[in-house]
Amino acid sequence: MTTHDVLIIGAGLAGMRAAVAIPAHLNVGIISKVHPVRSHSVAAEGGINAAIHPDDSWEAHMYDTVKGSDWLGDQDAIEVLCQEAPQDIHRLEQMGALFSRDAAGRIAQRNFGGLGFPRTCYVADRTGHALVHLLYEQLLKRNATVYEEWYVTSLIVQEGVCCGATVLNIRDGEVSAIGAKAVILATGGCGRVYKISTNGLINTGDGMALAYRAGVPLQDMEFIQFHPTTLKETGILITEGARGEGGYLFNSRGERFMEKYAPKMKELASRDVVSRAAYQEIMEGRGVEGCVMLDLRHLGKKKILEKLPQIWELSQTYAGVNLAEAPVPITPGVHYVMGGIKTNLWGETPLPGLYAAGECASVSVHGANRLGGNALMETITYGRRTGTSAAEFSAKAKQIPLPDVKEERARIDAIRLSSKGEKIGAVWGDVGSIMADYFGIVRAKDRMKEGVQQLQSVRPRLLNLALMDHGHIFNMELIEALQLYSVMDLAEVIATAALHREESRGAHFRSDFPKRDDTHWLKHTLSYKTETGLRLEYQPVTLTRVPLAERAY
Ligand SMILES: Cc1cc2nc3c(=O)[nH]c(=O)nc-3n(C[C@H](O)[C@H](O)[C@H](O)COP(=O)(O)OP(=O)(O)OC[C@H]3O[C@@H](n4cnc5c(N)ncnc54)[C@H](O)[C@@H]3O)c2cc1C
């Protein structure tokens, strides 16, 4: 039996940062369904927030984050993030992160949405790329066992403790168990629940589904972030850095429409506000073929190429637009899930032995709306904290004997050998369309009820998937089927939580309840899987330093 002191599921920034934080004498295993440097973190563009400038303060970062969260973020968790972020950035630099520099040679910082101070550190518009490669080097130096191209199919829980995972080696199709004294989920987001998204194809929310099936609650899953600027049809992200560097948004009449919706911050209001504004312009007929226009021409070619080289390339390749000469059509698109596996300030979930960090977790720093640049910071700060606490737990724990994986193997074999029924893509496409149509930027009770019913009618179709490939070696169709199960679970959770929250807050906008309602809804939604179906519970929000206030930009 293979065992580790700590088993980390997910090798994006959160998983790798956790691994590097674990003392060297402990035996660490880290699993990823793709090679670690292909984790979605590698795609992060615009930057990472920390109050490192002498004129800035962690208190100001905290205020912006609480306001951005529409007061749903837990303020103790936000305080930890904002206080510890500067030190974590310096540690990254000491490891060798090549942050872009300002004229004085310090780490450069740019403006980002919802920030009262230019606080976003960056590496041009390829920040994730730089950080993922940096941490991969550190991971190799640390000497962990890396299971690359292995897929986790379930968590193993014995005697009320999470003590390992069942894994499928994608290379040869073998199903086995890996034991651990502590398990960390760092499996990233679930953008692929929606039809079009900025997320990589691997962002199917597996870890959230694994935890949910093991009885761990998912928190605040109704809050799905729509990024204001994604390329038409493809959903490819155009970083907020484009507006941070001074880009404007225009409607079909040539009006800089954000002046109307957010007179002070304009294009740099928080993402939910800008996305709703763009959506409203488009719905009221002031769009251009379903888009609005992002204009960077006034920045000039030199600055665009220096600060936003990737955006230049993406616009050219996927929209045929030369950013120095023409505006690029963009539309709001699914980007990030604010909610996730419920954890405390040390990454512990309610299930002993199980931890979570990064986008799959909800310690709740983002509340109802995340500020751009805070997700990367969360992966680093909470990745480190979670690695540290899982290591402490494992030092005191004993390895619980693992059960036979016969049943899990049989379940997977049944899916692999299934040949009668529908194509995976057809079912997945329907889930994605239902989510996009009924649980989008603007939501309402009747529509959502219909959406929930439609999801219910899709569910049984998962039992009749027809696979063309019944083999063991690199059976990606099998992986796709397993991912569809995750997507289906999460679609139901998102839909149910959204239907029940009868207010508008952050990214959750209800046309039938257009106001924030602190009297009844200043609380987190917890979704539990039970034998009789999904159960919702609510839990108070932690308020500390930043008193409740109305949110205006
Ligand atoms: C295009 C894009 C740009 C972004 N830009 C920014 C930005 O500039 N600033 C910012 O703050 N945020 C940004 N974000 C958000 C941020 O990048 C992510 O939230 C963050 O990187 C997630 O990191 P993670 O470590 O939690 O997960 P990921 O990097 O997504 O890694 C997940 C890991 O889990 C593994 N995994 C998942 N399921 C399984 C399974 N069943 N078995 C085995 N392994 C599994 C994957 O293989 C992967 O290694 C961006 C997101 C996108 C999509």
Image (tube, helix red, strand yellow):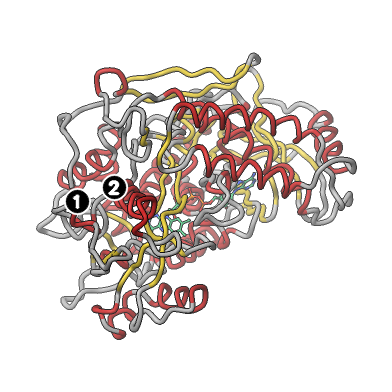
Front-most of residues 264 and 327: 327
Q: Residues within 10 Å of mark 1 (few under 14, many from 20)?
A: some
Percent x, y of residue 278: 34, 54
All told, the count of numbered labels is: 2
Q: Nearer the viewer, residue 192 or 156?
A: 192
Residue 427: x and y in percent read 71, 43
- Residue 99 coordinates in the image, percent (x, y): 32, 69
**Residue ID at (33%, 65%):** 252
> Looking at the picture, does residue 87 appear above or below residue 124?
above
In this image, 407 relative to 225: left or right? right
Task: Quadrant for residue 412, please give it.
Answer: top right
What element does badge 1 sit on?
loop
**Residue at 36%, 33% in the rendered image:** 511
Q: Is residue 289 left or right of residue 432?
A: left
Q: Which residue is mark 2?
A: 273
Query: Residue 472, can we see it?
Result: yes
For residue 529, which numbered disc appears in the image? none
Q: Which residue is mark 1?
A: 262
Position of residue 306 relative to residue 43, above or below, is: below
Identified by mark 2, the residue type is Val
- Disc 2 packing (10 Å; few <14; some 14–19; many ≥20): many
Q: Are marks 2 and 1 in contact (CB under 8 Å)?
A: yes
**Residue 214 against residue 176 in the figure, above or below:** above
Identified at 21% across, 74% down, the residue is 102
Residue at x 18% of width, y 57% of height? 259
Sooner in the amino-acid sequence: mark 2 or mark 1 = 1
Q: CA distance from mark 2 to mark 1?
A: 8 Å
Secondary element at image label 2: helix
User: Which quadrant, please, contains the N terminus?
Assistant: top right
Where residue 81 sits, quadrant-wise, is: top left
